[in-house]
């Protein structure tokens, strides 16, 4: 974040006795019209048009309030400009107006002493309330945050219980094995020419007829100007500081790279041989694979991946049928017409395919 000081300006105040508005925080410690002392808690920020710059401002610190007459004195004063009383370590420092902020290109609005006093009053009330709460200990009533927390917690709990009931509440039931089935497959691969593509720094060896094309490979963040705000901060000595704060802004930009298109010889699945059956006698077997030209030449073929699945169809007491894919060891125990125990979802009514125990 980049921070830049724009300048230092006078806070303003309105005289509460003769109503003279827009008196200057530093120059007018007393009202030039009636002589009434400045109340530091009535100091406010001016609009941009009413801003009065303080050149070569030397900052000594927050004003000190005279304990005897409440006049605001510069932090370096040893005696009160209002009543002459000594200003010692027991003098209270002037309170700060809260910081204000506008976006880029926006102007600050003006205020009056009423706004400043209202803010001071609200701050005092909040402090008093906090002090009372600290004294009284925790309040008997629940705080708003706690109430919201409890409601949210309750809702989450109910949803969790519902999900649990929906998916995990099961009961044991008896099902009948209605049908058994198996399927086995073997891929047949041929070593043949295929077209493929890869980023040019990842092209496999053996690639032929390589052509290149620029394509989007990733994205990166690039800085796209800045996002700025203007802030004004009370110096607590009758002036305020205006600051510009900027954060870099980013946008996504595509990153292009060379994509290579090529031809290459590769083992490629050209067909899948399949065997299936609906009984466990005869036992499941692999399909026959006839190879045209075994070997590693171009145009040669070989066996690829093998896969096998075993499934059972059950009918429950309500006559509803369920299908399960199971391990071979479970499948081997299945006989059409046999009664098995299994778990079924109370709400979902779906059969838990991992819960079988043959009931004998
Ligand atoms: Zn006045
Ligand atoms: Zn005084």
Image (cartoon, rainbow, N blue to C red):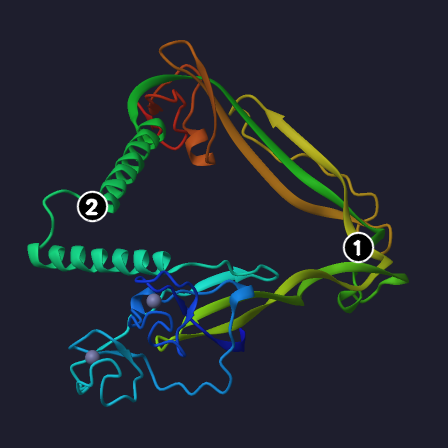
In the image, taking residue 176 as reference, residue 258 lies left or right, namely right
Residue in view at x 27 percent, y 55 percent? 122
Q: Nearer the viewer, residue 276 or 241?
A: 241
Compute the Cα span from label 2 to label 1.
70 Å
Determine the secondary structure under disc 1.
strand
Picture coordinates of residue 269 (x, y %)? Answer: 75, 44
Residue 309 in sight in this render: yes
- Which one is earlier in the sequence, the residue at label 2 or at label 1? 2
Q: Residue at x 28, y 73 (%)?
A: 94
Instruction: Tell me where residue 272 appears, x and y as whole percent.
Output: 72, 37
x, y (%) of residue 96?
33, 69
Residue 143 has which mark? 2
Residue 218 left/right relative to 322: right
Which residue bears the numbered disc 1?
Answer: 266
* Residue 167 screen position, x and y as percent: 36, 30
Mark 2 vs mark 1: give the one in front: 2
Tell me the residue at 47%/65% (across/down): 46
Dot label at residue 253: none
Q: Is residue 278 left or right of residue 193?
A: left
Please state, as top left, top right, bottom left or bottom right, where the C terminus lies in the image.
Answer: top left
Extreme residue in the front direction: 34
From this viewpoint, which residue is outermost toward the left? 136
Total marks shown come to 2
Most foreground residue, 173 or 200: 200
């Amino acid at each position: 974040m980049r921070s830049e000081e724009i300048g230092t300006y006078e806070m303003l105040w309105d005289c509460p006795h003769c109503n003279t508005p827009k008196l200057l925080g530093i120059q007018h410690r007393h009202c030039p019209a009636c002589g009434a002392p400045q109340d530091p808690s009535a100091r406010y920020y001016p609009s941009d048009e009413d801003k009065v710059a303080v050149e070569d401002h030397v900052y000594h610190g927050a004003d000190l309030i005279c304990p005897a007459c409440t006049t605001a004195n510069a932090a370096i004063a040893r005696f009160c400009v209002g009543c002459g009383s000594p200003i010692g370590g027991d003098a209270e420092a002037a309170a700060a107006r809260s910081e204000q902020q506008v976006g880029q290109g926006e102007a600050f609005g003006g205020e009056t002493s009423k706004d400043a006093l209202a803010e001071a009053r609200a701050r005092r009330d909040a402090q008093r309330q906090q002090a009372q709460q600290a004294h009284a200990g925790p309040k008997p009533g629940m705080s708003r945050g706690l109430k919201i927390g409890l409601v949210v917690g309750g809702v989450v709990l109910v949803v969790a219980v519902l999900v649990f009931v929906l998916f995990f509440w099961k009961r044991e039931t008896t099902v009948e094995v209605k049908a058994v089935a198996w399927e086995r497959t073997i891929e047949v691969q041929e070593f043949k020419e295929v077209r493929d593509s890869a980023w040019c720094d990842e092209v496999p060896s053996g690639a032929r007829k390589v052509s290149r094309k620029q394509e989007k490979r990733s994205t990166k963040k690039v800085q796209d100007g800045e996002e700025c705000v203007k802030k004004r901060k009370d110096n607590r000595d009758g002036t305020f500081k205006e600051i510009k704060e900027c954060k870099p802004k980013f946008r996504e930009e595509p990153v292009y790279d060379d994509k290579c298109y090529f031809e290459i010889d590769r083992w490629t699945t050209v067909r899948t041989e399949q065997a299936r059956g609906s009984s466990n006698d005869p036992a499941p077997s692999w399909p026959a694979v006839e190879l045209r030209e075994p070997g590693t030449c171009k145009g040669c073929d070989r066996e690829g991946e093998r896969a096998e699945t075993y499934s059972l169809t059950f009918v429950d007491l309500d006559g509803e049928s369920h299908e399960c894919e199971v391990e071979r060891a479970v499948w081997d125990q299945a006989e059409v017409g046999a009664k098995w125990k299994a778990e079924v979802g109370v709400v979902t009514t779906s059969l838990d395919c991992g819960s079988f125990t043959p009931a004998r």
